[in-house]
Image (cartoon, rainbow, N blue to C red):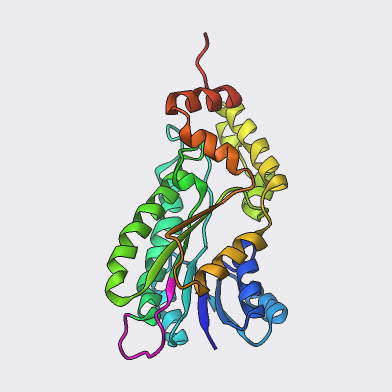
Amino acid sequence: MRSVVITGVSTGIGWATAKLLLARGYRVFGSVRKPADADRLKAEFGANFVPLQFDVTDEAAVLAAARDVRTALAGLVNNAGIAVAGPVLELSADQFRHQMDVNVIGPIIAIQAFGPLLGSDPSLKGPRGKIVMISSVAGKNGNPLASAYSASKHAIEGLSESLRREMMLFGIDVIIVAPGAVKTPIWSKADEVDISAYKNSAYFPALQRVRQFMLHLGEIGLPAEKIAARIADVLTSANPRVRYEITPDPMRHLITAVLPKRMVDKIIGKRLGLLPPA
């Protein structure tokens, strides 16, 4: 039976990926932070699901989980992540640091802990596994008032590119899956995000518009199952591409990719009210 580790399986893309891979005959080790989620998922998913309880930023806990798994893996899916909103001028260093800790340092910790189980440890026999890095369309674009999140996903893109070349030594592939808007709690809970700390900020009206746009994305976003299907295909493909971008509106992303950056700046600035007075 092929085994995979997926970080962040309590909801969204991680949950959908675990469900699909279990249906395809995998054993899934899935990380959760709360005991209640571990119990719920064991009841939902059955005997071939093994919960791993850790926060991805807790290196000791992740290493302990890897020692418990101690089996050859077909894949590691670095999915766990958060989104921190706010303007660079006013976002605290601690908030920025937390964003990077979860979205960048967390995957690095997971790679170092579980990487040997994918084929770099010669004592474990089995085919070489793959590392799937969940990035975002924000990994190639800079989104205003989501600078911390965009920076973290840019970091994931660079990390993955470098790691793929390093892991050639062991025959371990690294593939990026970069979704656009997905119907997950990261979007649907936008209305719960507290922006009151910025009520006296010049950015407050734009933050309100961003929050409404996030709610809209939650409504039109792709189902998490579509991203899960791509991840499952990547894990079984003999020759996957190095990066897959999956969005509900690919034409919009194509247009913004080919337009001059200054023109895109003006379009975004007008939509969010970020242009200076005439």
Q: Residue 119 lies in magenta, yes or no?
A: no
Compared to 44, does 106 lie above or below? above
Main secondary structure found in the magenta portion: loop
Residue at image coords 36%, 81%: 119
Q: Which residues are magenta?
A: 120-130
- Identify the residue at image location x=61%, y=35%: 210
Instruction: Report the residue at 47% width, 85% height from top.
Output: 69
Q: Residue at x 47, y 75 (%)?
A: 75
Viewer-nearest residue: 47 or 228: 228
Left or right of 236? Residue 43 is: right
Which quadrant is home to the N terminus?
bottom right
Query: Eyeballing the image, is 26 above or below 233?
Result: below
Pinpoint residue 108: horizontal percent, then vertical percent: 37, 64
Name, please, the residue furthest toward the top: 278
The image shows residue 233 at horizontal and vertical percentages of 55, 69
Percent across and percent down for residue 218 are 68, 47
